[in-house]
Image (cartoon, rainbow, N blue to C red):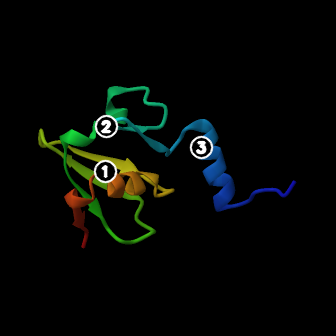
Amino acid sequence: MEMLSGRPLECWIDHRLKRNTFELQGDVIVRGRGATESDFVRVADLESWTDFGDPWICVVPMRLRDGRIVEWLDPHLELERILRQVAAEKMIAGY
């Protein structure tokens, strides 16, 4: 078996520990294990999200309808992929 190193190893560890991972459960985006209320965003509550178009910027700011701004770390671009799937029309280009 070939040993993983660098980025693939980090990605594998993150997924095993559910760290920096995202999944869509119905109409809710869940961060990690979904252990706290701040780990959930309902797609319907999303007003906009920002894509900086730069693979080195892995923070995704999301503005919610109640005015809050939620910023989640997305080093594996999973959140961005989900947002493009369910809320592409709400994307704002950064810079």
Label 1 or label 3, whichever comes before in sequence order: 3
Circle 1 sits on which residue?
Answer: 86
Which mark lies nearer to you, 2 or 3?
2
Label 2 or label 1, whichever comes before in sequence order: 2
Name which residue type carries label 1.
Answer: Val
Residue at 44% over, 53% down: 74
Up-down: is 78 above or below 68?
below
- Can you name the residue that lies furthest to the right here? 1
What kind of element bears circle 2? loop
Tag 2 and tag 3, C-beta contact below 8 Å: no
Residue at 64% over, 60% down: 7
Separation of marks 1 and 3 at Cα, in angstroms? 22 Å
Looking at the image, which is closer to me, 56 or 41?
41
Tag 2 and tag 1, C-beta contact below 8 Å: yes
Crowd band around label 3 with a 10 angstrom C-alpha radius: few (<14), some (14–19), many (20+): some
Residue at 50% over, 44% down: 21
Circle 3 sits on which residue?
Answer: 15
Could you say where residue 86 lies in the image, as x and y percent from the top left?
Answer: 31, 51
Quadrant where the image shows the C terminus: bottom left
Label 2 or label 3, whichever comes before in sequence order: 3
